[in-house]
Image (tube, grey):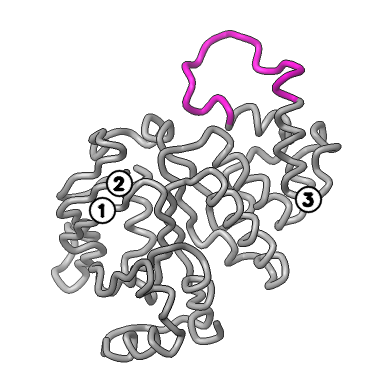
């Protein structure tokens, strides 16, 4: 579903050599349809840059990105969005705060469809939204006309997750989407994530600083350091991994910078 070949991204190329930053260094990666991949790494390891290049919010200096055999390397972000669903770290991102739940969901449902002057709402669509919101078990199915900006962070992130997956994207990107939530709410959103991804068999990449979550969720794990993939495990190998195993692998990297989330996981 996703094929990345020799992907490189360099920042500060026009400044002094000592300021040059190689964020991604000749990365190649293939992710099969239906794989749920968790990505870990220290600060500056290249995790967010990888997601940004796939999403199109940044353009690579070298390499190729294919989604479902379609070359999207030079495709603009808004055109690439028909293939991709994204949930950001900030619950305020990805939604229009002053629009209702129904209006936000309608925009998400039409993301990959041809734009026109046809009326965007109908009874059948409203019922579909209610059914989808009911699966979140947050009581939001009766609040279709409420502004989404009035929801709590956890509720809003759960709705954003629903918006990102309502049209069954080719690829779902989760950029530390529970990092801004309290532990209890984060657990709820992660459980919802796992249910939605599993039910719809979505090809998913989830960045996280929490090693426990990286091991618990998904069927494959990647570790990045200095813009390179330094560890890749899937299937039975991933299931047997422990936090101690990951810490030992991090410990073998002399220049790895731990984050509080990684140490406290």
On residue 173, the disc is none
In the rendered image, which residue does mark 1 sit on? 30
Give the mark nearer the N terminus: 1 vs 2: 2
* Residue at 57 percent of width and 47 percent of height: 199
In the rendered image, which residue does mark 2 sit on? 2
Asked if the stretch drawn in magenta spans residue 216, the answer is no
> Quadrant location of residue 207?
bottom left
Q: Residue furthest front?
A: 236
Apparent side of residue 26 relative to residue 184 in the rendered image (left or right):
left
Residue 13 point in image, percent of width and height: 17, 59
Label 3 crowd (10 A; few <14 / some 14-19 / many >=20): few
Residue 194 point in image, percent of width and height: 57, 57
* Residue at 44 percent of width and 52 percent of height: 204
Asked if the stretch drawn in magenta spans residue 116, the answer is yes
Region of the chain picked out in magenta, as a range: 109-126
Whether residue 80 is situated above or below residue 149 in the rendered picture:
above
Q: Residue furthest top?
A: 117
> Quadrant location of residue 79?
top left
In the rendered image, which residue does mark 3 sit on? 137
Count of labels shown? 3
Label 1 crowd (10 A; few <14 / some 14-19 / many >=20): few
Whether residue 54 is situated above or below residue 259 in the rendered picture:
above
């Amino acid at each position: 579903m996703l094929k990345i070949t020799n992907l490189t991204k360099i920042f500060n190329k026009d400044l002094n050599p000592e300021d040059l930053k190689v964020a991604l260094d000749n990365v190649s990666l293939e992710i099969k349809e239906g794989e749920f991949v968790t990505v870990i790494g220290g600060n500056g390891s290249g995790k967010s840059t990888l997601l940004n290049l796939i999403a199109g919010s940044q353009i690579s200096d070298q390499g190729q990105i294919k989604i479902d055999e379609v070359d999207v390397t030079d495709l603009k972000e808004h055109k690439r969005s028909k293939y991709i669903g994204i949930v950001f770290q900030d619950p305020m991102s990805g939604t229009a705060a002053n629009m209702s739940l129904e209006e936000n969901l309608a925009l998400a449902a039409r993301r990959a469809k041809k734009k026109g002057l046809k009326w965007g709402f109908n009874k059948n669509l409203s019922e579909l939204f209610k059914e989808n919101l009911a699966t979140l078990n947050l009581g939001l199915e009766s609040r279709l006309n409420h502004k989404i900006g009035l929801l709590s962070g956890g509720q809003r992130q759960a709705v954003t997750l629903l918006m990102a997956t309502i049209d069954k994207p080719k690829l779902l990107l989760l950029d530390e989407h529970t990092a801004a939530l309290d532990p209890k709410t984060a657990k709820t959103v992660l459980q919802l994530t796992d249910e939605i991804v599993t039910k719809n068999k979505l090809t998913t990449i989830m960045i996280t600083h929490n090693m426990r979550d990286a091991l618990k969720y998904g069927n494959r794990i990647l570790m990045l350091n200095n813009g390179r993939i330094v560890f890749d495990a899937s299937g039975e190998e991933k299931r047997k991994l422990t936090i101690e195993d990951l810490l030992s692998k991090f410990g073998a990297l002399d220049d790895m910078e731990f984050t509080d989330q990684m140490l406290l996981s």
